[in-house]
Amino acid sequence: MEPVVFVAIIAGLILLLLIVGAPLKPIRYVGQMVIKLVIGAVFLFFLNTLGNQVGIHVPINFVTSAIAGVLGIPGVAALAAIDYWVI
């Protein structure tokens, strides 16, 4: 294969990735947020399962799942503390 053809193929692939990759970035962020919401809902499910003995019940909805998913275990602990002491 001649070097000119090889460089043209590589340049074409880079151009294709630049054109196609730009619209895919926001979709990637939305997908990551959906995954975090699902993980937050699973965290809250386990909190409700284990916290049932102590009287802690945090409802699983969009806001609490987002807090638990984005903040992780400290967010779940904060929601449990709010439920236990405030509500």
Image (cartoon, rainbow, N blue to C red):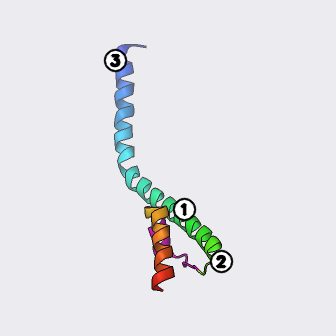
Q: Residue 79 in magenta?
A: no
Residue depicted at 34% across the width and 29% down the height: 11
Query: What are the residue bounds of the magenta stretch?
Result: 56-70
* Relative image position of residue 54 (x, y in whole percent): 61, 78
Few, some or many residues within 10 Å of mark 1 (<14, 14–19, 20+): some
Tag 1's secondary structure? helix
Few, some or many residues within 10 Å of mark 3 (<14, 14–19, 20+): few
* Relative image position of residue 61 (x, y in whole percent): 52, 76
Residue depicted at 41% across the width and 50% down the height: 24
Q: Which residue is mark 2?
A: 53
Instruction: Please identify the quarter of the rendering in which residue 67 is found.
Output: bottom left
Question: What's the residue type where badge 3 is placed?
Answer: Val
User: Is the residue 9 above or below the residue 1 in the image?
Assistant: below
Q: Decide: marks 1, 3 in contact (CB < 8 A)?
A: no
Q: Earlier in the sequence, mark 1 or mark 3?
A: 3
Instruction: Please identify the quarter of the rendering in which residue 9 is found.
Output: top left
Q: Which residue is mark 3?
A: 4
Few, some or many residues within 10 Å of mark 2 (<14, 14–19, 20+): few
Q: Residue furthest top?
A: 2
Q: Which residue is mark 1?
A: 39
Q: Earlier in the sequence, mark 3 or mark 2?
A: 3
Name the quadrant of the N terminus: top left
Q: Nearer the viewer, mark 1 or mark 3?
A: 1
Q: Earlier in the sequence, mark 1 or mark 2?
A: 1
Q: Residue 69 in magenta?
A: yes
Q: Spatial distance from mark 1 to mark 3, Cα to Cα?
A: 49 Å
**81 vs 38, nearest the viewer:** 81
| Residue 80 in view | yes
Question: What's the residue type where badge 2 is placed?
Answer: Gln
* Relative image position of residue 17 (x, y in whole percent): 38, 39
Residue depicted at 50% across the width and 65% down the height: 37
Instruction: Please identify the quarter of the rendering in which residue 2 is found.
Output: top left
